[in-house]
Image: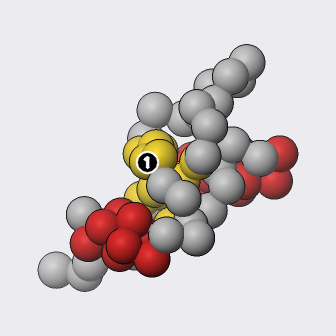
């Protein structure tokens, strides 16, 4: 059985990040998006898993990757 890739997008609540995440999710890809502040005023595809993570914190990033 082939394993599906997981795309980890840093800054998924940004303009580019949001559209890239939606594009990948619509293609059936698994997407995990990180954010510092909760998203407001827009919604992402339900298939996108959101994770609060400070990417300058190595342990936080390692935790997200291991999940």
Q: In the rendered view, would you say 49 is above or below 55?
A: above
Q: Residue at x 26, y 72 (%)?
A: 66
Tell me residue 14's x, y (percent). 77, 47
Q: Residues within 10 Å of mark 1 (few under 14, many from 20)?
A: some
Query: On the rendered structure, is 67 left or right of 7?
Result: left
- Residue appearing at x 65%, y 50% in the figure: 12
Q: Is residue 37 visible?
A: yes
Residue beneath the point at 58% across and 32% down: 38
Among all residues in the image, which is located at the extreme bottom?
2
- Which residue occupies the foreground of this view, 49 or 54? 54
- Quarter of the image with the C terminus in it: bottom left
Q: Is residue 45 left or right of residue 59?
A: right
Residue labelled with disc 1: 51
- For residue 9, what is the image quadrant? bottom right
Q: How many marks?
A: 1
Q: Is residue 55 above or below residue 15?
A: below
**Residue 21: x, y in percent?**
62, 52
Q: Residue at x 46, y 32 (%)?
A: 46
Q: Furthest-left residue in view?
A: 1
Left or right relative to 5: residue 33 = right
Q: Give the residue furthest to the right.
A: 15
The N terminus, quarter of image: bottom left
Vertical position of residue 43 compared to residue 10: above or below: above
Q: Position of residue 6 (x, y in %)?
A: 41, 69
Where in the figure is residue 62, as x and y percent of width and height? 35, 75
Badge 1 element: strand
Q: Residue 31, relative to residue 51: is it above or below?
A: below
Q: Is residue 26 left or right of residue 19?
A: left
């Amino acid at each position: 059985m082939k394993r599906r890739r997981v795309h980890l997008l840093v800054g998924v609540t940004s303009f580019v990040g949001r559209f890239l995440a939606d594009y990948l999710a619509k293609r059936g890809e698994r997407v995990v998006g990180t954010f510092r502040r909760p998203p407001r005023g827009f919604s992402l595809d339900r298939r996108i898993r959101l994770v609060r993570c400070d990417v300058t914190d190595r342990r936080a990033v390692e935790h997200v990757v291991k999940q």
